[in-house]
Each structure stands twice: as C-alpha cells, then as structure tokens.
Image (cartoon, rainbow, N blue to C red):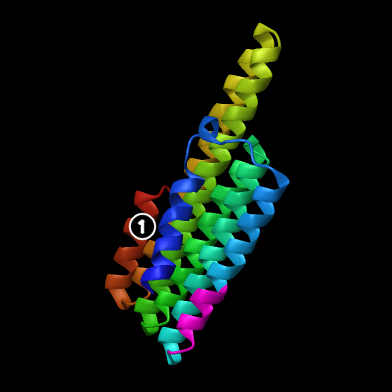
Amino acid sequence: MKHIHTIIAMSFFLAFAPIGLAQAMTKTDYRTQQDKIDADYKLGKAACENMSGQQNKLCMAQAKAAQKISEADLEASYTPTRKTHYKARVAKAEADYSVARERCNDKADNAKDVCIKEAKAAETSAKADATVQLKSSDAAATANEKTAVAKSDAKTATTDARTDATVEKRDARYAVEKEKCDAMAGAAKDRCLAQAKTTFGK
C-alpha cells in the first residue's frame, strides 16, 4: 500500500508542476516511462492479491488511479501543451474520485450516500478549476497575439469560465447538503432542505 501511495504522491507533484519546468522528452524516454508505469501497476496489483474483500477493492482502485495519473502526466511531459496539462488535472480528479468512491463502500445508508456526494463534489470542483485554468491560459495566449479587442474578449472568457466553475461547485455542494437532509424526517428535514436552498440560492 505504501508503494501505491508513493506513486500517487509523485503523480500529484508532476500534475501540478509548472509547465516551464518540463524537460524535452525523447521517444525512448517516453517508452521507458511507459514501461515503468506498467511495471509499477503490476507491482501494485500484485500487492492487492494478498488482500480480500473491500480492502482488495480499495487497493485495486488505488493502483488503477496511480496508473491513470501517471499516464496522463507522461503525456503532459512528452507533449507539454495547455491541453495535455488540463487532461492531466482532469485525470487526477477522476482518479481521486474513483478511490474516494471506493472508500465510501465502507459506509452504509445515508452516510454512504453523503460520502459519495462529497467525493463527487470534490471531483466537480477539481475539474471546474482545471477548466478555468485552461480557458484562462487559452484566452491569455490568444490575447497576446491579437488586438485590444481580443484582450477584452479574453478577459470576458476568463470571467465566464470562473462564473461557470462557481456555479458547478455550488450545485455540487448543494447536492451534498440535500443528501444529508435525507437522513432526517418531518419538520427537521424540511428545515434542513430550506436552509440548504437558502445557503445555495436555490
């Protein structure tokens, strides 16, 4: 398990490393890294074979998540563009969700439902932030090449992206609060839902 956690930690660092730090990677280097990712996954998978039940499922989810993150990071290193770095961030968000979702299976009833909603909210937030960063960098690049009008359009695009991200995050958090209210009944549940609607502007 420690080995798997180390892979995930390294992948997290690579996913958020500044683009400017990326070194030119040869095709040979790329293939070598691909082989290493495959080997690390096989090691992680082998470690899971000694476990059973939910522990085995969680271990496998972590191994697959580490592989997915590493593969996306490798693509971003081999072809360092705004798009590939965006995909790496999205891959991490999805991988983190898959592991968190598996952890939720240790819970039951409403606690499990809330756990899943919280995991989904975290994924939504991470993806929204990745989208904002992509759109902002794309707009900035376009603005640097064009006129003042283009710069104004770029600023608008960035603002719109941030607004959309805020809405997505708010909706995800609202879904979490609604799920928590489902554990209640009667007047208490009504008050909980009313408070959630007020808090999130619904």
Residue 179 visible in the snapshot: no
Is 44 covered by the magenta stretch? yes
Residue shown at 56% from the left, 57% from the top: 70
**Depth order, front residue of 100/116:** 100
Question: 150 above or below 115?
Answer: above
Question: Residue 69: percent from the left, percent from the top?
Answer: 55, 58
Q: Does the magenta stretch include residue 63?
A: no
Q: For the point 51% across and 33% down, which residue is it? A: 21
- Mark 1 is on which residue type? Ala
Residue closest to the far left: 188
Residue 140 in the image: x percent, y percent? Answer: 60, 21
Give the residues drawn in magenta, as a range: 42-50
Q: Pick the quarter of the image with the N terminus.
A: bottom left
Residue 143 in the figure: left or right of residue 96: right
To which residue does mark 1 refer?
196
Q: How many numbered marks does the figure carry?
A: 1
The answer to whether residue 53 is above or below residue 67 is below
Q: Is residue 99 visible?
A: yes
Residue 150's image quarter?
A: top right
| SS state under label 1 | helix
Task: Indicate the quadrant where residue 3 lies.
Answer: bottom left
Q: Tell me the chief SS of the magenta region.
A: helix
- Image location of residue 106, percent across then percent down: 37, 83
Residue name at image x 48 percent, y 50 percent: 126
